[in-house]
Image (spheres, grey):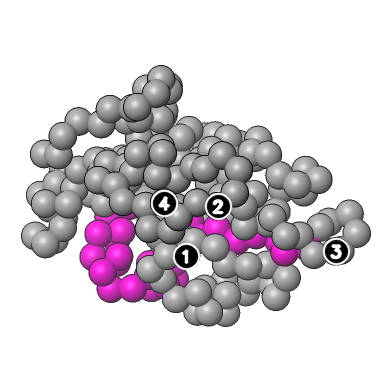
Amino acid sequence: MSESRTAEYPIENFLLQRWSPRAFTPEPIPEQDLLSLFEAAKWAPSSYNNQPWRFLYARRETASWPLFLDLLVPFNQSWAKHASVLIVVISNTKFDHDGSASITHSFDAGAAWANLAIQAWIKGYRTHGMQGFDYEKARLQLEIPADFQVEAMIALGKQGARDSLPEQLRSREEPNQRKPVAASIAEGKFAAHLLHAQGK
């Protein structure tokens, strides 16, 4: 196992403990639990309160599951096939109130995803965000309108045993570390240390 996580500055413990495993158990998620995660996402901040995020999802026991699983690259399919839910995150690139372009739609959708991930952790579920899927295929197969941007996919479920993973992934199934705070901040102008910040 890797060294335990330690914060440089005081934060809530659940933020420090949350991580993104790949081992899941296939047990179904009760609908009320799933909806509570989307409820948490709903309360994320967004420009003009536009709430541009949308979550398309498939539960493994439904007809939509193979469609969502097939969007993933083979590497991600090898472990995400055991998750309980697969989610595609998209965001509206235009404001609802006047149809003008929203510059922060992806930023806002990211805030909603973070809320979902944190609420999932608190409720005993685990999430793993992914970019390893076919974005254009997702747009076509899920009939996503042109004004919406495909952002990411999420695997969701209860954490499973490390041994359930393909052998090459087992050694990576542990919480990772983070760069020092100083590596990602600069007071005032952009600083050279931000170009290639190194961390654990």
Q: Mark 4–mark 1 contact, CB under 8 Å?
A: no
Span highlighted in magenta in the image:
66-94
Looking at numbered disc 4 in the image, what kind of residue is underneath it?
His
Q: Which is nearer the eye, 199 or 48?
A: 199
In the rendered image, which residue does mark 4 sit on? 193
Dot 4 falls on a residue whose secondary structure is helix
Q: Which mark is residue 190?
A: 2
Residue type highlighted by circle 3: Ser
What is the spatial separation of the Cα atoms under label 1 and label 2, in whole angstroms? 46 Å
Dot 2: what SS? loop
Q: Is residue 7 left or right of residue 188?
A: left
The N terminus sits in image quarter:
top left
Visible residue check, residue 30? no
**Which residue is rendered at x = 42% and y = 65% of the image?**
131
Residue located beneath label 3 in the image: 100
Give the distance between the C-alpha atoms of the residues marked 4 and 2, in whole angstroms: 9 Å
In the image, residue 79 lies in the stretch drawn in magenta: yes
User: Is there a contact, CB below 8 Å, between mark 4 and mark 2?
Assistant: no
Which badge, 1 or 2, is on the more N-terminal residue? 1
Indicate which disc residue 64 carries: 1
* Front-most of residues 27 and 181: 181
Residue 150 in the image: x percent, y percent?
A: 57, 67
Nearer the viewer's eye, disc 1 or disc 2?
Answer: 2
